[in-house]
């Protein structure tokens, strides 16, 4: 079964036979898949009235376990944004009553960000919707194939995930 990537690789091989375009066979598909995943995420999150960045922050807090709170620094680490961006995001989520700021009992100057009941509900519902979308994307693969693909992608992304900065 030929796909769009097969056609673009064939065109490059014809036009630039001097180049090894093999990486395109994998990474162009990863790029296209990322666009489909982004669309699926937006659908799942819009059903509960969230933006993707809101999902990222709320689910970081939800994964922290009860009492569903983290320092802004911990949220930075998990969401890979700047401190200014995180402050803005926390402000916006607090205005929507999805998170609240609390004093950090272990640091008089610090704060903790805690998920509200409404924030927890939206995190849970959006995750459930996302998983439905993601299962549909992976439907053509068997359980074994999904495991193999996860392992290969882990090997490919590992060096990036484990590099500081």
Image (cartoon, rainbow, N blue to C red):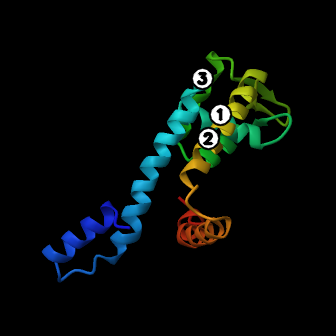
Image point (52%, 34%), residue name: 43
Packing grade of label 1 (10 A; few <14, some 14-19, many >=20) is: many
Q: Which residue is mark 3?
A: 91
Per the image, label 2 sits on a secondary structure element best described as helix
Residue 147's image quarter?
A: bottom right
Residue nearest the viewer, comparing 28 with 120? 28
Q: CA distance from mark 3 to mark 2?
A: 25 Å
Q: CA distance from mark 3 to mark 1?
A: 21 Å
Residue 60 versus residue 7 in the image, above or below: above
Q: What is the quadrant of the N terminus in the image?
A: bottom left
Residue 62 versus residue 155 in the image, above or below: above
Per the image, label 1 sits on a secondary structure element best described as helix
Q: Which residue is mark 1?
A: 126
Q: Which residue is mark 2?
A: 130
Please name which of the two marks, 3 or 2, marks the residue nearer to the observer: 2
Q: List x then y, in percent, for residue 119.
A: 71, 26
Q: List x then y, in percent, for residue 87.
A: 58, 30
Answer with mark 3 or mark 2, whichever residue precedes in sequence.
3
Instruction: Report whether residue 132 is seen.
Output: yes
Badge 2 vs badge 1, beta-carbon distance below 8 Å: yes
Q: List x then y, in percent, for residue 135.
A: 62, 50
């Amino acid at each position: 079964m030929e796909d769009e990537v097969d056609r673009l690789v064939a065109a490059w091989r014809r036009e630039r036979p001097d180049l090894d375009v093999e990486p395109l066979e994998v990474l162009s598909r990863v790029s296209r898949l990322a666009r489909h995943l982004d669309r699926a995420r937006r659908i799942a999150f819009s059903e509960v009235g969230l933006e993707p960045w809101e999902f990222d922050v709320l689910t970081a807090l939800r994964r922290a376990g009860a009492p569903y709170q983290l320092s802004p620094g911990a949220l930075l680490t998990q969401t890979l944004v700047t401190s200014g961006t995180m402050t803005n995001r926390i402000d916006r989520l607090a205005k929507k009553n999805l998170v609240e700021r609390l004093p950090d009992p272990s640091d008089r100057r610090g704060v903790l960000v805690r998920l509200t009941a409404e924030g927890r509900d939206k995190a849970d519902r959006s995750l459930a919707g996302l998983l439905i979308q993601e299962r549909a994307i992976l439907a053509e693969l068997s359980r074994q194939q999904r495991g193999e693909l996860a392992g290969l992608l882990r090997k490919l992304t590992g060096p990036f995930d484990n590099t500081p900065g």
